[in-house]
Image (spheres, rainbow, N blue to C red):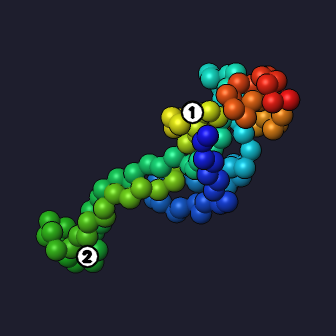
Amino acid sequence: MSTHYHVASVTSPSVKGMTTMPDDFDFSTHYSVAGREGIAFYAIDFATTSTEESWTFIGSDDDDPEDEANYVYDEPEEVPDLTRVRLVMVGDDHVWTVDVDDCEPIADDAYCPECGQIGCRAYA
């Protein structure tokens, strides 16, 4: 039997160059996924993405832009990608990463809790 993990909320990061979306994805329901119709999925969490590494100039206008001492290194960070979510098929353990827009909520009685097939009535 698979373990279900649910995330209550995710703080939207303020990362330069990253578009953030509201945290309105429901991690407490099951989903049908476009391209994988017929099987129910449950959500684990948002996917992550890495920020780009960069060097930030911290010197003043009078400082030499060629002097490495006037820069600080910005390490890449793993941040939530609020456009993609990590899902697991009911009855399986493989993690899939899909676009949030490809997920359609389904009713609890629309799928089999054992095999995950949408429309299966073995437990109805």
Please tell me whether mark 2 sits on a helix, a strand or a loop.
loop
Q: Read off the residue under disc 2.
A: 59
Please tell me whether mark 1 sits on a helix, a strand or a loop.
loop
* Residue 92 circle label: 1
Q: Earlier in the sequence, mark 2 or mark 1?
A: 2
Q: Which quadrant, please, contains the N terminus?
A: top right
Q: Residue at x 53, y 61 (%)?
A: 13
- Asked if residue 53 lies left or right of residue 85, the reply is left
Front position in the image: 113 or 73 = 113
Q: Amino acid at mark 1?
A: Asp
- Asked if residue 78 lies left or right of residue 30, the reply is left
**Residue 46 image offset from top left, x and y in percent:** 56, 49
- Asked if residue 106 lies left or right of residue 75, the reply is right
Q: Residue at x 76, y 37 (%)?
A: 105
The total number of labels drawn is 2
Q: Residue at x 73, y 35 (%)?
A: 113
For mark 2, does the 10 Å Cα neighbourhood hold few (<14), some (14 to 19), or many (20 or more) residues?
Answer: some
